Amino acid sequence: MAKELTKEDAEKIKADVVVDARGQSCPGPMLEAKKALAAKVKAGQTLELLSSDHGTRNDLATMCERSKGRYDYIGFFDTGGYDRHFVKKVK
């Protein structure tokens, strides 16, 4: 389940890779996240995904839950116009 972060929590997270998928509808943000996690994010690093599609909240959390420990969904912060999602690549 998607965890909503406070603004303070979100500001403490240092993203190693940022992907802007704002304006894309499903499945665009998910495809962008998967592509970045596979090619750009190394183990131990954090991906920040910017998405205006609210379906990404549950989709990204579910993908991480089903990843068999490869990804940890930290949560999202609703900026009022789009969400900032954070995923840590574990292995």
Image (cartoon, helix red, strand yellow):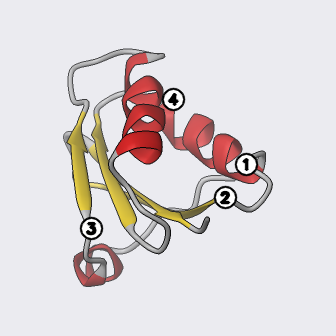
Relative to 9, 14 lies left or right: left
- Please report contact status of discs 4 and 1: CB closer than 8 Å, yes or no: no
Read off the residue under disc 1.
67
Relative to 42, 71 lies left or right: right
Tag 3 secondary structure = loop
- Please report contact status of discs 2 and 1: CB closer than 8 Å, yes or no: yes
Read off the residue under disc 3.
15
Residue 61 against residue 72 in the figure, above or below: above
Mark 4 or mark 3: whose residue is earlier in sequence: 3
Name the residue rendered at 42%, 62% in the picture. 42
The x, y position of residue 81, in whole percent, is 19, 40
Q: CA distance from mark 2 to mark 1?
A: 5 Å
Tag 4 secondary structure = loop
Read off the residue under disc 2.
70
Name the residue rendered at 44%, 46% in the picture. 37
- Please report contact status of discs 3 and 1: CB closer than 8 Å, yes or no: no
Read off the residue under disc 4.
55
Mark 4 or mark 2: whose residue is earlier in sequence: 4
- Which image quarter is the C terminus in? bottom right
Check disc 1 and give the amino acid type. Ser
Q: CA distance from mark 4 to mark 1?
A: 18 Å
Check disc 2 and give the amino acid type. Arg
Q: CA distance from mark 4 to mark 2?
A: 21 Å
